[in-house]
Amino acid sequence: MRFEEQLLMDLKTEMAARNERSRRVGRRLLAGAVVAGLAAVAAVAVPLLTGPEPAYAVSKNANGTITVELKEFRDADQLEEDLKDLGVTADVTYLKPYTKCQGDRGALVGGEYDTPEEWRASAHYKVARPGPKGFVIDPRYVGKGQTVVLEFTENPKGPVKSQLKAEVIEGRVKPCVPEHDSTQLG
């Protein structure tokens, strides 16, 4: 075999090897793209199939109290339904930062309170207390025909996520009309 023929054969062999390597790299890239595509589809499809993460968690404690852990300020109507299923009539309102509900929302159980001692002895103080995973509702302080009114004001600053105002109302609860709260900083 002449030198030129040998050179031509070596060149053909090298070109064939390069084409094979190129095909392997292409297949690897294609396989990688397919895997990445499937991962992206799963990342979108799983939340669509399972739904968004719940805004809150509700659990009944052994002593009859109810723990509510808020994760997001949404689904107030569903929280009211879940509390009703556990025996507590509730009116839940989520407020924007630096706002509160205007005026009174109804007839307070036990009437008005004037001193800190009266407040601490009232159903309003005892019905909803901070707990290790959120707040705890004690159904013993919500009687028949009464509603626990829970107003959460979002707190954009500081380590506490929200401020809670709880009252127990006898009879009909008036709707919340939000207004500026000058007692909050900001």
Image (cartoon, grey):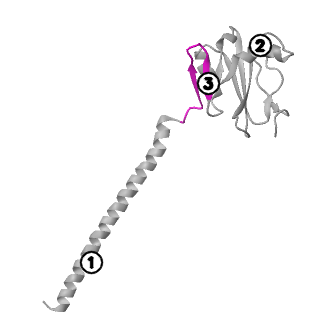
Amino acid tagged 2:
Ser
On the picture, is 101 further left or further right than 69? right
Q: Which residue is mark 2?
A: 122
Q: Secondary structure at mark 3?
A: strand
| Residue 112, position as x, y percentages in the image | 84, 13
| Residue 171, position as x, y percentages in the image | 75, 11
Q: Residue at x 46, y 40 (%)?
A: 46
| Residue 69, position as x, y percentages in the image | 61, 28
Residue at mark 2 to residue at mark 3: CA–CA distance: 21 Å
Q: Which quadrant of the view contains residue 110?
A: top right
Q: Which residue is mark 3?
A: 68
| Residue 94, position as x, y percentages in the image | 71, 30
Q: Which quadrant of the view contains residue 42?
A: top left
In this view, the residue in front, 166 or 15, is 166
Amino acid tagged 3:
Val
Q: Is residue 142 above or below residue 43?
A: above
Residue numbers of the magenta segment = 52-69
**Is residue 78 visible in the rendered structure shown here?**
no
